[in-house]
Image (cartoon, helix red, strand yellow):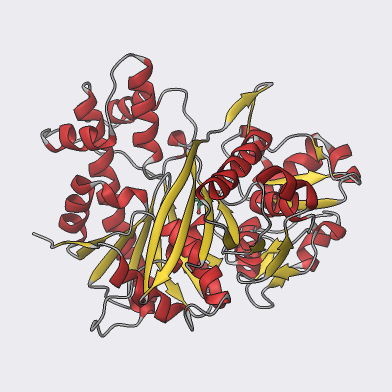
Amino acid sequence: MEKYYLAVDIGASSGRHILGTVKDNKIILEEIYRFDNGMKQENGHLSWDVESLFVEIKEGLKQCKKLGKIPVSMGIDTWAVDFVLLDEENKILGRAAGYRDDRTTGMDEKVYEIISQNDLYKRTGIQKQIFNTIYQLMAVKEKEPDLLKRAESLLMIPDYFHFLLTGEKKQEYTNATTTQLVSPVTEDWDYELIRMLSYPEKLFRPLSMPGTKVGQFTEDIIKDVGFSCTVVLPATHDTGSAVMAVPKVPGRKELQEDILYISSGTWSLMGTELPAADCSIKSMEANFTNEGGYDFRYRYLKNIMGLWMIQSVKKELAGRGEIYSFAELCELASKESIPSLVDCNDNCFLAPESMINEVAGFCQRNNQPVPKSAGEIAAVIYNSLAVCYKETAKELQSITGKTYSSLHVVGGGSNAAYLNELTAKQTGKTVYAGPGEATAIGNLLAQMISYGEFVDLKTARESVYQSFSVKEYKPM
Ligand code: LFR
């Protein structure tokens, strides 16, 4: 009898249910359900439609039943930093705000009135992103204080879905670190910091590690989806899951700590793994983060605007009746020779009304040729990303004192062949591209290790290499 595990992986633009099994030490995946996602404008604010997302989660579960493939366990991962506040009846207070919403404008200053930016970094090791939970909570405290007063619990988005499935409230560690309220020293909530900020302490309960059993489906869910299942925590932060699935290439001498990765999706998360957080000022100035990972390994990385830029352009073009696939945009871009570059980390690309105009405007402001056609716009974006990867690799080498010879690109963006070629060329490193479904695979690995399918993460990563196609791009 096959033993199935189910990963529900929800990204900013789509979600999927993926069943995984292990056979002869190899992981076999089956995608059984897929749905769209995106932040929606709600009364002038960007929010997530968590109700619809939960309907989709249950639809995918029903699909397991239909196929007769009932998982022994399941777990959900999503993007980070966003949360819901629940009242005493477990109803959402306000809305599930999306991290691209501008409610956090100026909230950094409010936080720094209480704790300086340097001290905050020293305590948490988390890079400044204006959308971090710490700033979002400040926005609630400043603008909707009543909500914070009435809040009985705070659950990050995946924790909330796990609660809806089981009735159990767990706060998962890897995603909790993205709040910028967790200490990399105690690996627990930084209660002193929380008190300084006057955030209600009761919202921050004991943290749970990936692999922890959350509970069984509630009676209502069983009735609805037709079976029961144990919910097991993956690294609920999607990047945490994706980096778990960075394959271990057999025979390669380096330790996993000696390799670079890019988790490539809506964001490009580029970095390495560290056994302990680097909370130095040098690291802060380079804007690197220390996100908590599986087994308390640290993802030392930088957020780069990533394929969000291409996703936005693709959507905008489609709105004008110009329909292209990502592969087509890559292909068109590869034929262009426009030399213009933009700074992918400029905040103007975070939530622009028109990404096309924003890219063009950046080029114009910087006296560079302005891209006009779809191919030119895509070329500027892909080339700029590759240059940004080169610079980030250099910064990392200077901070860690290591020289990295290879670079793993995992996640959906690893399918962008043209970008992989540019990345190999710019960084001068061998690029190993794949697996594309790294996030779902990492989610499954946490469950599989918990059920004894693999003894540890290293063995699981070796199996990832054996199980999925990894394409090599040599620098030219
Ligand atoms: C990627 C990701 C990043 C996080 C950003 C916002 O999907 O989770 O790691 O910085 O989304 O949550």
Front residue of this view, candidates 23 and 56: 23
- Identify which residue is drawn at 26% across, 85% down: 253
Q: Residue reaching furthest left? A: 476
| Residue 268 visible in image | yes
Left or right relative to 378: residue 107 = right
Looking at the rendering, which quadrant does residue 441 occupy?
A: bottom left
Left or right relative to 469: residue 358 = right
**Residue 355 percent coordinates (x, y):** 39, 27
Left or right relative to 181: residue 418 = left
Looking at the rendering, which quadrant does residue 39 occupy?
A: top right
Front residue of this view, candidates 243 and 21: 21
Q: Identify whether 140 is placed above or below 244.
A: above
Front residue of this view, candidates 287 and 385: 385
| Residue 113 visible in image | no
Looking at the rendering, which quadrant does residue 168 occupy?
A: bottom right
Counting the numbered discs, the total is: 0
Q: Identify whether 399 is placed above or below 68.
A: below
**Residue 216 percent coordinates (x, y):** 73, 61
**Residue 56 percent coordinates (x, y):** 59, 38
Quadrant in which the C terminus is drawn: bottom left
- Identify which residue is drawn at 42% across, 76% down: 460
Front residue of this view, candidates 318 and 126: 318
- Identify which residue is drawn at 28% across, 25% down: 364
**Residue 391 percent coordinates (x, y):** 30, 57
Left or right relative to 242: residue 151 = right
